[in-house]
Image (tube, rainbow, N blue to C red):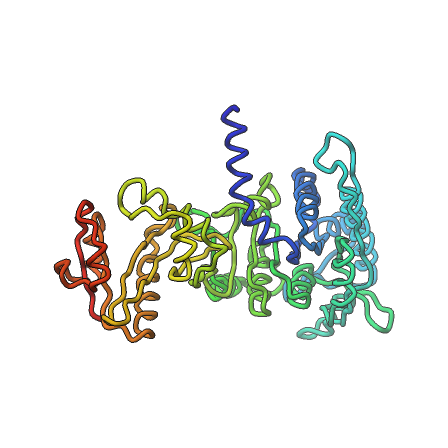
Amino acid sequence: MNDDTKQYVNWFRHSSPYINAHRGNTFVLMLGGEAVADPNFANIVHDIALLNSLGVRLVLVHGSRPQISERLQQKQISSQLHHHLRVTDQDTLTCVIEASAIVRAEIESRLSLGLPNTPMAGSRIKVVSGNFVTAKPVGVLDGVDMAHTGEVRRLDSDAIKQQLDDGNIVLLSHLGYSPTGELFNLAVEDVATCAATSLDADKLILFGADKGVMDSSSELRSELLARKAERLVAQYLSSLQDTSEAHTELSRNLEAAVSACRGGVKRCHLVSYKQDGALLAELFTRDGAGTMVLQESYEQLRQATIEDVGAVLQLIQPLEKDGTLVRRSREVLENEIEQFTLIERDGVVIGGAALYPFAEDKMGELACVVVDPEYKGGERGDQLLQAIEQQASQLNLDKLFVLTTKTAHWFIERGFVENSVDQLPGEKKALFNLQRNSKVFFKTL
């Protein structure tokens, strides 16, 4: 097996937790007209087909801004922006309909490919579109009649869910229909956000030219809390001179992500349509390839269950090998797994610690404190310690103790004081391993 094959096998194995986590979930993907026109769009379609084959329920929302502008230019029709929206008069609406139809046909034809020796071989994807979006007119804004420019009134979420249940991909455009039979030009971000919130989607994925949000050092931010994203959008909008200026693509996507998070969508992702494989890297690797916008931190503390035995073993084995932790067999760990508190990041266990209570002595042993080396430095050890201390207090324990050979200073810095082995509970003292000669530290709660 050559190095490339080994690397692929290793990546595929590590992607399995994400494959299991995403199966049956609903993802809304927003593809602007720029994404559809980009040379990398063919690769994005292949990745969409892969998600479909892995059991992800997909709603695609497409725009057609550059295609509309191109047709307006061809017909020498001037376009007006007001409050960052295109004013859609009757002539403009004709161009909007034509451009939207072209983009829709392009997406449907790409998803219909099934040639042998291609990533789409045997996919047989069914794409469904229709009048799922009910719209209403924006009306008159500051004296300007927006004509056929509209906004989403509601989405027929039940009908869309039925199509998803049948295994179909649902394709939504930026066109909306009114009960009176009128047609409206909508912002693609408005449709995508409403689709994600109405469908209780697990993710909203927004494609843009940029990889995501950069920090002050021009480094990609892998995650961003919604409240911070909201501040960034507000700062940008305040810098605009007038409402005839168009938002940047990034600001529109950030604004959509914030709105979706406020509407209950757990995670929104900004990824680049120019970067080959960005969608898969964002969804199936730990650190992703874009910026994730979320309401709160997506790491969670939770109690371990029997299903976590394998993950905990994988986490502690390197420290068992170098002697930092006492070796535990799978059988022992299966019996003790409920003593563990874990940190889980996007479905992957990245840290843990155990509490073994000695109720008669009103003490508890803090054991097996470990954080994945890739995630050290984020105060996760402190989070685990705090969680264990809270558990100990709830059990009416007065003290915590820990036995350690290599990490004494970490515990000292957190209020533990060295003491003698004789201070251990009798049951624990009888099992003390003289060969390891661990130091004993206590902390009063």
Q: Nearer the viewer, residue 375 or 156?
A: 375
Establish if 25 lies above or below 434.
below
Looking at the rendered image, the quarter that the C terminus falls into is bottom left
Q: Residue at x 76, y 53 (%)?
A: 167
Q: Residue at x 66, y 56 (%)?
A: 24
**Image-based side of 418 in relation to 221, left or right:** left
Can you give x and y, in whole percent of width and height, for residue 212 in the image? 52, 50
Q: Quadrant of residue 391?
A: bottom left
Can you give x and y, in whole percent of width and height, for residue 124 in the image? 79, 43
Q: Nearer the viewer, residue 334 or 44?
A: 334
Furthest-top residue in this view: 2
- Residue 415 visible from this viewpoint: no
**Image-based side of 161 in relation to 286, left or right:** right
Can you give x and y, in whole percent of width and height, for residue 413 in the image? 20, 59
Q: Nearer the viewer, residue 338 or 314?
A: 338
Furthest-right residue in this view: 181
Establish if 198 lies above or below 114.
below
Q: Nearer the viewer, residue 133 or 370?
A: 370
Q: Residue at x 56, y 45 (%)?
A: 16
**Image-based side of 241 in relation to 320, left or right:** right
Q: Quadrant of residue 269?
A: bottom right
